[in-house]
Image (tube, rainbow, N blue to C red):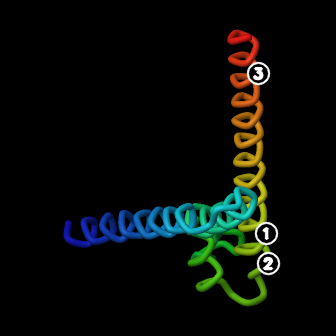
Amino acid sequence: MTSDFFFLLVIIGWLLMGFLIIKMIRLHIRAWFWRLLFVSIIAALFLGVGFVSGGGDPVCALPAPVILAAWYTERSHLFDNAIRPFLFCWVLIFLLMLVLKAIKLIWSDNKQYATKNVKS
């Protein structure tokens, strides 16, 4: 029971640390492209899923955050277990954030255009 509670605290601390780092990036970086880039990198590091080799079958692997997967994986499997999942998660998160930013910019331009036409 105690180990389950400790494990839950570690997970909550891990997510909280990632959230706080992302919050600090959003506060201190003003250019939207660089903010999206750095936030997506940190989100991929903390929330991206890498793989750590488990005991048993050679193809058996346990899911873990990318940072921990890079730390604990064997050097020969580093690319497949940590780097490739990090790149996949980073590109996916970055493209999603970029599309959402584009939709937000288009939406705000349409609202400004609509209010200009109504007032004149």
The amino acid on which the numbered mark 3 sits, given as a three-letter code, is Tyr
- In the rendered image, which quarter is residue 66 located in? bottom right
Which residue in the protein does label 3 denote? 113
What whole-number distance in Å separates the C-alpha atoms at marks 1 and 3? 43 Å
Question: Where is 61 relative to 55, above or below?
Answer: above
Residue located 24% across and 66% down the image: 5
- Where's residue 113, x and y in %? 76, 21
The amino acid on which the numbered mark 2 sits, given as a three-letter code, is Phe
- In the rendered image, which quarter is residue 111 located in? top right
Bin the neighbour count of mark 1 within 10 Å (Cα to Cα): few under 14, some 14-19, many 20 and up.
Answer: some
Q: Which mark is drawn over residue 2?
A: none
Please state, as top left, top right, bottom left or bottom right, where the C terminus lies in the image.
top right
- In the rendered image, which quarter is residue 44 located in? bottom right
Which residue in the protein does label 2 denote? 79
Comparing labels 1 and 3, the label whose residue is closer to the camera: 3
Determine the secondary structure under disc 3: helix
Residue located 67% across and 67% down the image: 38
Q: Are marks 1 and 3 in contact (CB under 8 Å)?
A: no
